[in-house]
Image (tube, grey):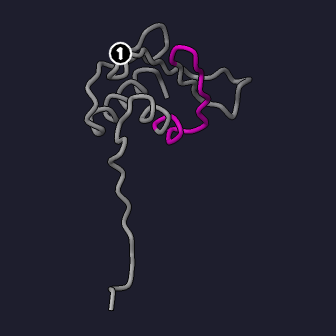
Amino acid sequence: MTPPELRDLISDALALWQVPGKVRVVEGRVALAAPDGTPLSVHAAEPADRPIRWWLERPGQRRPCTSVLGLLRGLRNAVGAGEGEARRARVALPEA
């Protein structure tokens, strides 16, 4: 996945999560800011880092991501999207 393709994926994810933000490609990295202003960046891992595919970075933290789903999950947590809103379907017998 190229940096522009990754930028578009992250932009779409932010829109889906209803998180405002501008996503751009800077020096081969995808850069954005969390709603609290924390700078975030995503860049491709080196071949020697495999199975890691991307690194998600913020000040003081560098998180490895081995898949697109892992990257999106880490990014969703980093921007605080969906906190406290998760709903789960439950199947139960009706009370007698």
Give percent across and percent down for residue 42: 50, 21
Q: Quadrant of residue 55?
A: top right
- In this rendering, the answer to whether 41 lies above or below 76 is above
Q: Quadrant of residue 87?
A: bottom left
The outermost residue toward the front is 96
- In this rendering, the answer to whether 60 lies above or below 74 is above
What residue is rendered at 38% in x and 18% in y? 32
Give percent across and percent down for residue 20: 25, 26
Amino acid at the residue labelled 1: Gly
Asked if the magenta segment contains residue 69, the reply would be yes
Is 67 left, or right, of 94 in this rendering?
A: right
What residue is rendered at 37% in x and 17% in y? 33
Give percent across and percent down for residue 26: 43, 9
Is 42 left, or right, of 81 in this rendering?
A: right
What residue is rendered at 53% in x and 19% in y? 57
What residue is rendered at 35% in x and 45% in y? 84
Q: Which residues are magenta?
A: 58-72
- In this rendering, the answer to whether 69 lies above or below 79 is below
Q: Which residue is mark 1?
A: 37
Q: Residues within 10 Å of mark 1 (few under 14, many from 20)?
A: few
The outermost residue toward the right is 48
Q: Secondary structure at mark 1?
A: loop
